[in-house]
Amino acid sequence: MAAPRARQGILSLTIKDKHALYAAYMQFVKNGGLFIPTSKPYKLGDEVFMLLSLMDESERLPVAGKIIWITPVGAEGNRAAGIGVQFSDQDNGVARNKIEGYLAGMLKSDKATHTM
């Protein structure tokens, strides 16, 4: 997973494989969400906008959301520093449905993710 690049408050995130997507996806969150590795300081409740590239798709998904999870630098258990972004209602589940389509059959797994 490539590190996000900040551009005027826009996070650009590329996820190239299913295992990285599984580790980043937060299915337990209303509307779905993603963990984004970053050491940039954010606060809970901050609004963010992402341009999300999934797998080999050429089109990037625009996704608005808010920060609901923060893993600080130096967190216990060598967890990756970053933020959890809950998808907003604005995209009517487009991002969540696309991600869950890629992860079909994997979402009931007990494998650890970046957040749980």
Image (cartoon, rainbow, N blue to C red):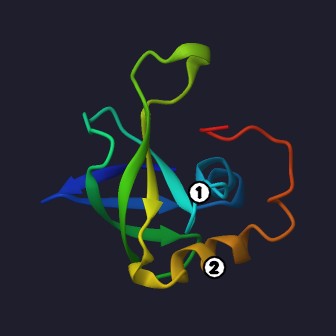
Residue at 27% in and 38% down: 43
Residue 76, how many percent across, how many down? 56, 14
Q: Given the image, on which type of amino acid does mark 2 rest?
A: Asn
Question: In the image, is 27 to the left or to the right of 85?
Answer: right
Dot label at residue 97: 2
| Placement of 86 over or under 36, stated as above or below | below
Task: Pinpoint residue 32: horizontal percent, then vertical percent.
Answer: 57, 64
Q: From this viewpoint, is residue 59 visible?
A: no
Disc with the residue nearer the chain's start (2 vs 1)? 1
Q: Quadrant of the C terminus?
A: top right
**Whether residue 67 is visible:** yes
Residue at the (57%, 75%) spot, across then down: 56
Q: Amino acid at mark 1?
A: Val
Residue under the point 42% across and 37% down:
82
Q: Nearer the viewer, residue 76 or 67?
A: 67
Q: From the viewer's perspective, is 105 left or right of 32? A: right
Q: How many marks?
A: 2
Task: Establish if 23 lies above or below 57.
Answer: above
Q: Residues within 10 Å of mark 2 (few under 14, many from 20)?
A: few
**Mark 2, secondary structure of its residue:** helix
State the image coordinates of residue 110 (x, y, percent, origin top left).
Answer: 86, 43
The residue that appears at 26% across and 50% down in the rendered structure is 46
Marker disc for residue 49: none
The percent position of residue 22, horizontal first and vertical second, equals 69, 54
Between 26 and 101, the one nearer to me in the picture: 26
Give the CA separation, mark 2 to mark 1.
13 Å
- Residue at the spot of label 1: 29
From the viewer's side, name the closer residue of 76 and 12: 76
